[in-house]
Image (spheres, rainbow, N blue to C red):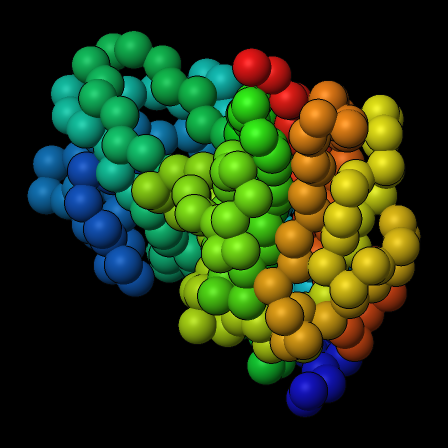
Amino acid sequence: MTFLNDEGFDSGLNWVQDGTRIDLCDDDPGSDYTLATNPSTGYSIGNKTGLVLTGPADGAQDGRIVTVPQINDGTITNTGTATHWALTDGSNVVASGALASSKGYTAGNKFSLDPIIINYRDAGVTATITLYAGPSVITKESATTANARIIVDQDGYTYYSEDEGSINPLRTRFSSEWADDWCRPVSEAPGDYEVRWLQVSGETPSSVTGSTPAGTWRALSLSDFVVTNTANVGNPIQSSTISIEIRRGSTGSALDSGQYLLIASYGT
């Protein structure tokens, strides 16, 4: 992978730090200063001035970042629906982007905005790694054999399965949205990413791909990674809370983690 010293990233991010005003916009202003800031002829429906950005600092996964602080008292100038933001320095758009979700506002009211992270990624790194962090209780009850599984797939998704011993269990995505893509874009998977599991509480899982011990990294290029709890007549309940972590094989630290409760129970 190509290396670039932090000073290379920071020279650009130091210029971004000149941004002192952020506008909410009802369309994408791109790099156009008038569109970004003018409420009459542009897209601005509100703004906050006097900002002081923090950074540059290391990114959560790689690269370098500056952060636009949280805003609690921005002013709405025009009634409309905000879809984008723009950071400006008095004459230039230094950064702009889409909001996480659009929101309607009424002129004269105030707006709040979560911190915005502006990230220079390391050269050659294009993927974002995020393990599903929503409701993650996986439960199966059966009168024969019950399996509760969490699956980190080579295709870039996180699946779960609640099955009765299928050799090829039905894989269900946690969400139809991006919430369960561990790799975005999924075309970057499996790459050189590695996964491991850690015991949080309860019993040791019934099986793990490759009999991988807790805390041991396994390359996703080898296969999907599956942690399973199994219950049957001889073992009527199996319950474990585990954590799963993912990292790049070339790094030593986890990029993200998710916690899952696997419950398999045998019953008639």
Q: Quadrant of the C terminus?
A: top right
Q: Name, please, the residue furthest toward the top.
A: 109
Placement of 109 over or under 42, stated as above or below: above
Q: Residue at x 25, y 11 (%)?
A: 108
The quadrant holding residue 93 is bottom left
Placement of 197 over or under 190, stated as above or below: above
Residue 20 seen: no
Q: Position of residue 44 (x, y in %)?
A: 23, 37
> Of 27 and 204, which appears nearest the observer?
204
Q: Residue at x 21, y 21 (%)?
A: 104
Q: Residue at x 55, y 67 (%)?
A: 154
Q: Position of residue 210 (x, y in %)?
A: 77, 64
Q: Position of residue 85 (x, y in %)?
A: 35, 42
- State left or right for residue 124 relative to residue 169: right
- State left or right for residue 236 relative to residue 136: right
Q: Name, please, the residue furthest toward the left.
A: 41
Q: Name, please, the residue furthest toward the bottom.
A: 2
Label total for image: 0
Placement of 71 over or under 250, stated as above or below: above
- State left or right for residue 231 relative to residue 177: right
Residue 71 seen: yes
- State left or right for residue 115 relative to residue 106: right
Q: Position of residue 21 (x, y in %)?
A: 44, 40
Q: Quadrant of the N terminus?
A: bottom right
Q: Residue at x 27, y 59 (%)?
A: 30
> Of 97 and 257, which appears nearest the observer?
257
